[in-house]
Image (cartoon, coloured by chain):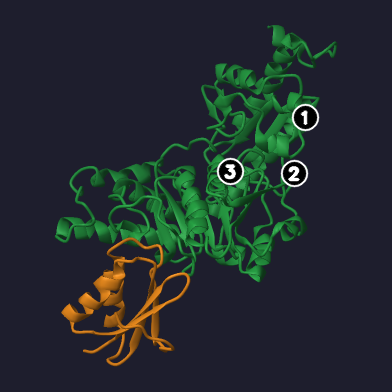
Amino acid sequence: MEKVYLDHASATPVRREVIDAMLPYFGEKFGNPSTVYDMGSKVKVVIEEQRGKVAELIGGKAENIVFTSSGAEANNLAIKGVALGRQKKGNHVIVSAIEHHSVLNSARFLERLDFEVTFLQVDQYGLVDPDRLRKAMTPETILVSIMHANNEIGSIEPIAELASLCKEKGVFFHSDAVASVGNIKVDVSELNVDLLSFSGAPLGGPKGIGALYFKKNVRLMPLIHGGIQENGRRAGTENVPGIVGFGVAAELAKGELSEKSASMSKLRDLLVAGVQSRIDKFQLTGHPVQRLPGHASFCFEAIEGESLIFLLAQNGIYANTGSACASKALKTSPVLTAIGVPPAIAQGSVVFTMDKSNHSEEIDYVLERLPVAVDRLRMLSPIWGKTVPVYQEAACA
Amino acid sequence: MRFVKDIHPDETLDLVCRMCPMHLLEPGDKLKCMKKGQILQVITDYDGALEDIPEWCRKCGEEFIGIEEDEECYKLYIKKAK
C-alpha cells in the first residue's frame, strides 16, 4: 500500500469542488468586497451567501457569524473579545485544562491583564464534571470555555449540560468545536452555547479560514482594528477565496455528515479492536464510547511517540503524536498529563484520525505494520525490560 | 450636550465594542425600518459618537433627543423625524 493518511486532525486534503469554487476569486472575481462598484459589491453578496452556508452547518444564522483567519483566531476572539468586552461585569474566566493552546494561551494572556483564570481539571477520560464547574464559578465569572471534542484524545464533552449551568448564572459559554464540526452533529441551539469556534480546514476546506458564532447579545471587543469588515468586529480585507471554500465545504459537510460519522465509527472501532488484540501494554486515551467517530488515540508503553510516527511514515502510514502544532515541542502533552497518564507512558502517544476517504483495507494495513513498529522500538528501549515482543520475527526482518 | 433620563425607546441598537463608523451606519439602516415618531436607542462605548451622532442627525433630518450616561456606556436617543 502506497500511502495511508490517518492524520486528518492536522490537515485534510482540500476537496476538488472546493478548489473549483475558489479559483475564480483568485482570478477574474478579484474585486474588493468593500468597494461600492459592482466588481466589489457582487463579491460582497457572495461572502454573505457563504456566511449563510457556514451558519447553517451549525444551526445558526448568518448574522451571528464572524469570519476569522483560523479556528485559533476564533478562539482568541471569543476568549479575549468577550473578557475585554465584559470586564466591567467581572474578571474571572474558566477554561478546562485540556483546551487547545489557542484557548489556554489566550486565558494566560488575560492573566497578564489581571483577570483571574481557573484551569478546570478533568477526569481520566478528559471530561469536565458539571459539579466541578458549578463550584468553580464565582459572582465575578464572566466566561466559561470548554471544548466540544478534544483533538488529542477524542472525548466529547457534555456541552449542553455545562452551558445550561452557565446560563443559570448569566455567564457566557464558549465552545471550541474545531475538532467536532463536520465529524458529528453540532447545533448551537441544542448545545445552548453563546459562542462557538470552528474552521474550514477539517471539512475539506482551505487552511486560513475560520469562524466564530456568537449570540446577538454577546459584545465582542475586536482584536484586529481597522476598517468595518465583518460588521465592525474584525478589520482587514476579507479572505474571499477562503470564505468561498469554507462555504462550499460546509454545504458538502452538512449533506454528508450522518454517512461520514457512521463509516468513520466503523473504521475507528476496527482499529481499536485490532490494536487491543495485537499489542499489549498500551492505553486507549480518551473516553471509550463518548468520542469522535474517526478518532483513535493510544499511548504505547516504553516507546517514544515521535519515533513511532517516523517508523510508520517509512511504511507509508501517516499519523501524529497529539496536537499537530505542539508535537514539535517534545514536551509531555498537557492533555495527557491532565487525564493522569504518567509521563513515561504519555511519551508513547499516537493519534489516528480518519476521514470518509479512508477504508477498511487501510486499517488492516496499519494493523499489520503498527505492532511490528511498536515491537521494534520496544526492543531498543532501555525501559522495556525483558518482555518478549509479540512480533519479534517480523520486527527483525 | 443634552442629557436625558427615563426615555422609553421603541428599538435598541447595541453597538458596544463595534468599530467606528458602525455607530453611524447601523442607526441609518435601523431607522429605515422604523415609523415616524418612534425612538431609537443607540448604546455605544465610543466617545466619538457623542459628537458624531447629533451631527449625523442634523445632516439626515432626524431628531437627536439626547444622551444618557451610565457606568458602562453611553445611550443616545434618536427620534425618527421623517
In terms of image quadrants, where is residue B14? bottom left
Is disc 3 on the same chain as disc 1? Answer: yes
Dot in front, 1 or 3: 3
Q: Are marks 3 and 2 in contact (CB under 8 Å)?
A: no
Amino acid type at circle 2 is Tyr
In the rendered view, tell whether residue A331 sits above or below residue A250.
above
Query: Colour in which chain B is shown?
Result: orange
- The subunit carrying tag 3 is A
* Numbered label attached to residue A342: 1
Q: Nearer the viewer, residue A130 or A28?
A: A130
Coordinates of residue B37 in the picture (x, y in percent): 29, 93
Residue of label 3: A104
Whether residue A3 is visible to the viewer of this picture, yes or no, is yes
Q: Farthest residue to the left: give it.
A: A37
Whether residue A256 is visible to the viewer of this picture, yes or no, is no
Q: CA distance from mark 3 to mark 2?
A: 19 Å
Q: Nearer the viewer, residue B66 or A23?
A: B66
Residue of label 2: A125
Q: Looking at the colours in the rendered structure, which chain would you say is drawn in green?
A: A
Looking at the rendered image, the quarter that the N terminus of chain A falls into is top right
- The subunit carrying tag 1 is A
* Numbered label attached to residue B16: none
In the rendered view, tell whether residue A196 sits above or below residue B27.
above
A287 on left or right of B36:
right
